[in-house]
Amino acid sequence: MSKFLEVNDLHIHFATDDGLVRAVDGLTFGLERGRTLGIVGESGSGKSVTSLGILGLHRGRSARVSGEIWLDGEELIGAPRDAVRKLRGRKMAMIFQDPLAAMHPFYSVGNQIVEAYRVHNSVSKREARRHAIDMLGRVGIPQPQRRVDDYPHQFSGGMRQRAMIAMALVNNPELLIADEPTTALDVTVQAQILDLIRDLQAEFGSAVIIITHDLGVVAELADDLLVMYGGKSVEYGSAEQVFRRPEHPYTWGLLGSMPRLDRDVRDRLISIKGSPPSLINLPSGCAFHPRCPYAERDGIPCRTVVPELLGDGHRVACHLPSPVRARTFAEDIAPHL
Amino acid sequence: MIRYIIRRLLAAVILLFVVSVVVFGIFFYVPRLAGATPDDLASRYEGKTAGAAQTHELAVKLGFTDPFYEQYGRFAKSIVAGADYSTGPTTEHCPAPCFGYSFITHNPVWPDLLDRLPVTISLAIGGALIWLLAGVGTGVLSALRKGSVFDRSAMGVALAGVSLPIFFTGLLSLSIFSYTLHWTAPGSSYTPFTENPATWAYDLILPWITLAFLYAAGYARLTRAGMLETMGEDYIRTARAKGLPERMVVAKHALRSTLTPILTIFGLDLGLLLGGAVLTESTYSLPGIGKYAVDAITNNDLPKVLGVTMVGAFFIIVANLIVDLLYAVVDPRVRLS
């Protein structure tokens, strides 16, 4: 248990009327302070549930969680609810996707930041308010002493996300999870928000998890990259490794479907055929096999055996032999990226 | 905010004016349309012994032969400024707001209404407090324990509550608690609060509970539905992510949003009841506005009916106004739009 955040064999299943949803199924990763992990995947790949699971916010009594989550030497799974609650917002904080929906419409922005601060610090309202104004200033909100009493609907989208970040960072959390922090924003604002997250991370030295379906976002920020598919990680390595020498066909698909300005507009984006699998009825064997153009080659058991995440440092869950993957990428995929 | 208040106030005054025109029209103009002559109207104001010539004289004196707008003008003026009725040698002054004299008792209507108002207000406000606390409380608990035995039984009782009319639950409760167990007053008595608060409450406790039972049932269902919806909102997740204790998440974040629409209905319900809790007052023979209205209608006592209708409309409009203003206080988004 050396790393700041260690997730070991995490399972989060939900019992529903339609069957057992295996939202997260055997996920393992680690993260150090000051580093950024990008978790990438399509909708429904289990990335948001993972982050909510770390904070203990996964919905419903029907959730079955197993595995281990260690945060700074403390085991979170099975810990008393109140103990986890006290860590939330103080030691680990979260930025949500849609800041308009994620902030209470009836309370002023300042009020909500003050509240986040006062849960964990016994200070006077005035003191907390001063702190909130200070935080708003640090995330780049102009005239914070005036805007502090505004309501969320009076902020622009980018300002709201900044306020959300201020709220998350108000207690100097050591772990910051950003769940699609830029999805709801304009492209120009997206870059500003990402810069802000990077600057604040440098300033606070927190560990950051960025959850996104947008590889462009993680390319900017992440040190490590975890690619999720069907509740499992299919590729995990440093951002350098995963971007330069991706080995999983799904990652190839994600990279191929990323629009790029330096490419001829007549080249079509390569989309991954098919749609994400149902988490209730995952395909047998490798969950990606129905959509994988390389499945069922030379008697490889894609359809029957679940591939393990193998490798040293750069780990991949694919039945194709490593040399074959390297060659396929170099010959078939890289020229089209 | 000030402009908003002024706008709403103006709207309320205009509405009251429109209501008075409509009410006056219904009682004095519609009968004319239906073929009644001024003499027919005037004959209601005097005894059966009067001859045709006398009746016609009265019709002219009461102004029933004048154009409608003049008649309305007198009606409105008598409400605002009072009226003078000359009865031959003497002139009787009816102080504002004057709704005329009862056909039966020959008392002016307004003092009668004033006498009865405390009964209705006591009944409505006491009942409202009970149903608000019981209804909202039950609804919140039901929502938080959705599907539990408590939830199911509470919703079952609530279904009974909204389905059973007051003249059923009222009589049933009278027969059990007053006539069999002798715990409560047997109805038809009212002691002013200023005279003896204990007796006041003793007289009213059964009507309060009966009235509250009907309304609490609806409020419980509304609150439950609202809470279930609110608890799924993103900002509730944010509140939890801050590390707020669940108690605060519910009381401060969820309840605030849930109560806002309930406030609207509460205002209207209360306004309606203040204009006369007809069924409850009749069932328990309480001398309130509702009972007064029923008696007036049964006896064809036109001035009384007019007075009651105007008072009822006044309460509903004022309640509406208060709700609108409160809404602006509660929901900051209303303030600026």
Image: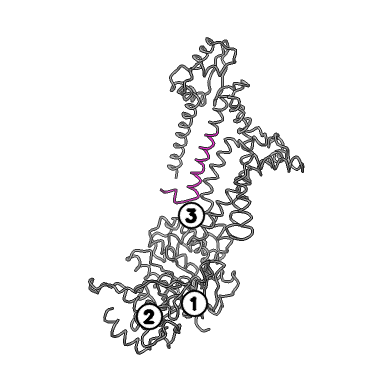
Q: Amino acid at mark 3?
A: Phe
Q: Nearer the viewer, residue A132 or B296?
A: B296
Residue at numbered disc 2: A239
Looking at the image, which residue is at 22% across and 73% down? A264
Q: x%, y% of residue B107? A: 61, 22
Q: Amino acid at mark 1?
A: Asp
Q: Nearer the viewer, mark 2 or mark 3?
A: 2
Q: Nearer the viewer, residue A119 or A22?
A: A22
Instruction: Tell me which corner region of the image, top left, top right, bottom left or bottom right, holds residue B50.
Output: top right
- Does dot 1 land on a helix, a strand or a loop? strand
Q: Amino acid at mark 2?
A: Ala
Q: x%, y% of residue A332? A: 29, 83
Looking at the image, which residue is at 46% across and 16% down? B65
Magenta run includes residue A332: no
Sequence-wise, the earlier of marks 3 and 1 is 1
- Does dot 3 land on a helix, a strand or a loop? loop
Q: x%, y% of residue B331? A: 48, 51
Relative to A17, say whether B82 is above or below: above
- Does dot 2 land on a helix, a strand or a loop? helix
Q: Is residue A129 visible?
A: no
Q: Which range is magenta?
A: B312-337
Magenta run includes residue B328: yes
Instruction: Tell me which corner region of the image, top left, top right, bottom left or bottom right, holds residue B289.
Output: top right
The chain containing the residue under callout 3 comes to: A
Residue at numbered disc 3: A106
The colour mode here is: one colour
The chain containing the residue under callout 1 comes to: A
Residue at numbered disc 1: A25
Q: Nearer the viewer, residue A76 or B127?
A: B127
